[in-house]
Amino acid sequence: MKKEFHGNFTQQEPLSEEAIEAAIKVMRHGRLHRYNVAENEASEVALLEQDFAKKFDVKFCLACASGGYAMTTALRALGINSGDKILTNGFTLAPVPGSIAAAGGEVVFVEVNEELLIDFEDLEKKIKSSKSKVLLLSHMRGHICNMDSLMSLCNSYKVRVIEDCAHTMGAKWDKKWSGKYGIIGCYSTQTYKHLNSGEGGILITDDEKIMARAIMLSGSYMLFDRHISGPDPEFFEDIKLNTPNCSGRMDNLRAAILRPQLANLEQKCNGWNKRYDHIQKELKGTKGLRLIQRHPKEHFVASSFQFLLPGLTSEAIQEFLISCAEKGVELKWFGAKEPTGFTSRYSSWQYAPKQKLVNTETILDGLIDMRLPLTFSITDCKIIAKIIKSEVRKLT
Ligand SMILES: *Cc1c(COP(=O)(O)O)cnc(C)c1O
């Protein structure tokens, strides 16, 4: 079969000249460590934190080594004890249950529905049965549940919410940024997320005590006063000697390339959504293919595209994936028995207690996932959608 599409699904945009210049400046002076500053100098990391806090109108921000590290730090900053049960979505990515394990918690998975959102009924059931006091809510692939309902449910049980915003940086539910509903918001700047520094993570909160602990945990030594976007020194007095240093800082080189990207975030988000809209329009009405419905209040950032092929055998889906791949369209499938590449599912995380999520299982069996890099043109997106459509038609 002839390849009809030649784009590369894992090729992100190159860094801007501004970002490259900023990185070179850091390399020229050599002060790569965030606390290595010249007199009266604020480090690039401290400035990134300040920029981020300003952009998302939050009191405090901490940049760190990865999104997974930010989530582990968030859990530890909430005072998670070994063996504490932590709720999270049954549909998420490996770093999420991994961060719970790293903090010593025990994962309790919650069902998701056909819109790939956490199932409120199952959430309430699991809150009651597990008595968990923390939900690590994963906005997996950028799908945002009704945050007003979620917060009122969690508040009524005194369950604290940490938001995993790896795919929702720049997104909103209603009028409020994703990451600002929970007590802590965590982001990733790993290459395939909305900002690219190779690896990196960001944690935000309005809570002084939580941020003071997060800063100590991240490895601030006694240099916490070098954080522009942290709480006053008095908040460190009681905790500075009994909070472990679990080094996971961000460095100035990565922060330097992130700052110009952050300034340009809206433009990138619009670019993703434009591509998503074209694919969505093209695939609408395709028999056998179910698009993910989105709430009018969900102002998402579509850096990837998902659809469902319900009711097909795994053989049929595998064939579909192969024929799309032969035409150049690289799709991922959450229904594979063996986890591959970036794609794994809750049953593959066997360090967690064995759990059965009947509905999530059925949904994942038919769930197809595709990256939407900004290196694709609108024409590319139309070609991709046409290929998918014609291959789905062959199935029915
Ligand atoms: C990428 C990702 C993270 C964080 O990943 P890191 O690689 O640790 O930065 C967290 N949650 C989801 C859903 C992700 O996709």
Image: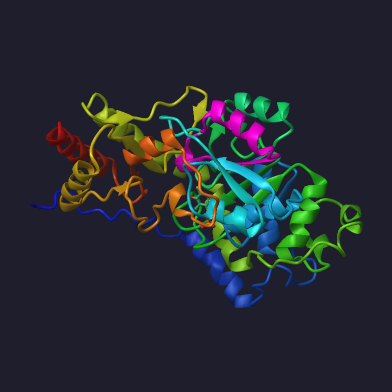
Q: Is residue 120 magenta?
A: yes
Q: Nearer the viewer, residue 19 or 230?
A: 230
Residue 178 at least partly seen = yes
User: Front-most of 206 and 289?
Assistant: 289
In which quadrant is the C terminus drawn?
top left
In the shown orientation, is residue 126 left or right of residue 58?
left
Find residue 201 and report its horizontal and vertical position in percent: 59, 56
Q: Is residue 37 left or right of residue 303?
A: right
Q: Position of residue 352 (x, y in %)?
A: 54, 53
Q: Residue at x 49, y 35 (%)?
A: 111
Q: Quadrant of residue 291?
A: top left
Q: Residue at x 45, y 44 (%)?
A: 268
Magenta residues (range): 118-143
Q: Position of residue 338 (x, y in %)?
A: 34, 55
Q: Is residue 320 above or below residue 73?
A: above
Q: Position of residue 223 (x, y in %)?
A: 81, 66
Nearest the camera: 110 or 241?
Answer: 110
Image height of 35 relative to 258, above or below: below
Q: Can residue 201 be seen here? A: no
- Number of marks in picture: 0
Asked if residue 304 lies left or right of residue 88, the reply is: left
Q: Nearer the viewer, residue 348 or 396?
A: 348
